[in-house]
Amino acid sequence: MDERAYYTESQAKRAATLNCPSCRTQDTYDLKWMVRKKVEQVPRGADERDRARFAKFLSYMVLMDDKAMCKNMRCRKRFDISGIKTMAFI
Ligand SMILES: [Zn+2]
């Protein structure tokens, strides 16, 4: 069974503090995450193995953004998001 049957997907925004590598300004950015929330019931048609995998499955979210645009008006450079976790269990 496909793991996709174990969760529902939605998007969420979460604030993160990032430092621009160009101007070194620290600011808060709303980053986009894909949230994969475990469904409450074992999916239909699950066999023993699927049930075991489902039991171990945990809801998690993955960061979708990989770049942010600096909020400093004199900089406005795009930079790679780094220093934060890109995957988290919820
Ligand atoms: Zn900057």
Image: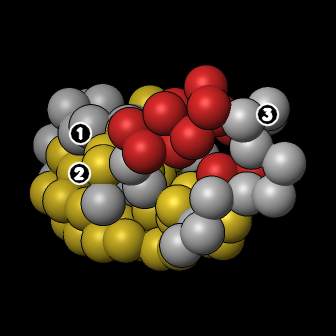
SS at circle 2: strand
Q: Quadrant of the N terminus?
A: top right
Q: Earlier in the sequence, mark 3 or mark 1?
A: 3
Left or right: 60 with respect to 67? Answer: left
Camera-near label (3 vs 1) is 3
Q: CA distance from mark 2 to mark 3?
A: 35 Å
Q: Earlier in the sequence, mark 2 or mark 3?
A: 3
Q: Which residue is mark 2?
A: 18
Q: CA distance from mark 3 to mark 1?
A: 29 Å
- Where is residue 50? Give x, y as percent: 64, 34
Q: Around disc 1, counting alpha carbons within 10 Å, would you say few (fewer than 14), some (14 to 19), or many (20 or more)?
A: few
Q: Earlier in the sequence, mark 1 or mark 2?
A: 2
In this view of the protein, can residue 35 be seen by the observer?
no
SS at circle 1: loop
Q: Around disc 2, counting alpha carbons within 10 Å, would you say few (fewer than 14), some (14 to 19), or many (20 or more)?
A: many
Image point (19%, 59%), residue name: 17
Asked whether disc 3 touches disc 1, contact meaning CB atoms under 8 Å apart, the reply is: no
Q: Which residue is mark 1?
A: 84
Of all residues, the one furthest to the right in this rendering is 45
Image disc number at residue 2: 3
Nearest the eye: 83 or 52: 52
Image point (52%, 61%), residue name: 38
Given the image, on which type of amino acid does mark 2 rest? Leu
Q: Around disc 3, counting alpha carbons within 10 Å, would you say few (fewer than 14), some (14 to 19), or many (20 or more)?
A: few
- Where is residue 61? Give x, y as percent: 45, 52
Asked whether disc 1 touches disc 2, contact meaning CB atoms under 8 Å apart, the reply is: yes
Image point (20%, 32%), residue name: 83
Mark 3 residue CB less than 8 A from any atom of ligand 1: no
Given the image, on which type of amino acid does mark 3 rest? Asp
